[in-house]
Amino acid sequence: MAASRLEINFIRLMSRCESIASEKRVETEWRLEKYVGALEEMLVALRKSPSKPTPEVLTDYTRKVDFLKGLLEAEKLSSSAEKALANQFLAPGRTPTIANERMPASKTVHMQTKARCTGEMRNELMGKGSSGADPSESDLRQRRALPLDERQSAAELDSILQQHHNLQEKLAEEMLNLARNLKNNTLAQQNIIKQDNQTLSQSMRQADNNFEKLKTESDRLEQHAKKSVNWFLWLMLVLVSFTFISMILFIRIFPKLR
């Protein structure tokens, strides 16, 4: 199965990291650590990729990345003895990274690192400094001896990493803007809900007041209706009584004709 674009970039970056690791670096060298971090991210992406390589290849990739990480951690140790001991426990990759390698580059880096740590231990025991003109001249010759295609590949990898970094910054800025917009929308919705709650509370209080007033008016109307009915009854009783008395008087005054 043909390698994916992600795997090709991973292999290029791995080759570049192994090339940098084979050189004697200064303390201010930061590229290797950044490159190894990018390798870890790309390895995670490879595991999740639908066109991922075989498990054996992934295992070897993981072995090489762990070797580079261990190499960086060993270089941060203070004494040469600790560095040499840490390098003894490192496990380099078993297969070449690129096709034109006779020996896996990680094994070559491992041997060079062990030789360098051994030389530093010897210099410390003999009281000599570990820095001098010869190592720097050797590093310069090694850098000048890099093939042209490898330097072009390194430039391409630097460009890819820079694009990846720019893309991450752009995504982070977009996520920050989205979070800011979401926060503003949430605050606006909270204000609208708060205003709606206040309006609803005022409406409920107004409805309660109207209900109390309606109840009071209903009681007053009921009392008024009761009073009106009572006066009407008394008036009817008076009229009936007056009519009855008038009829009796009429009969008494005008007796029945015989």
Image (cartoon, rainbow, N blue to C red):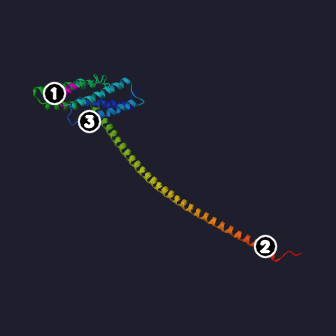
For marks 1 and 3, the one nearer the N-term is: 3
Residue at (27, 34) in percent of width and height: 33
Residue 94 drawn in magenta: no
Q: CA distance from mark 2 to mark 1?
A: 151 Å
**Residue hosting label 1:** 120
Q: Element under label 3?
A: helix
Residue at (31, 35) in percent of width and height: 157
1 and 3 marks in contact (CB < 8 Å): no
Quarter of the image holding residue 50?
top left
Residue at (58, 62) in percent of width and height: 219
**Residue hosting label 3:** 31
Query: Can residue 187 be seen at all in this image of the molecule?
Result: yes
Q: Element under label 2?
A: helix
Q: Quick one: 92 or 20, which is closer to the camera? A: 92
2 and 1 marks in contact (CB < 8 Å): no
For marks 2 and 3, the one nearer the N-term is: 3
Residue 90 coordinates in the image, percent (x, y): 26, 25
- Specify the segment rendered in magenta: 78-86
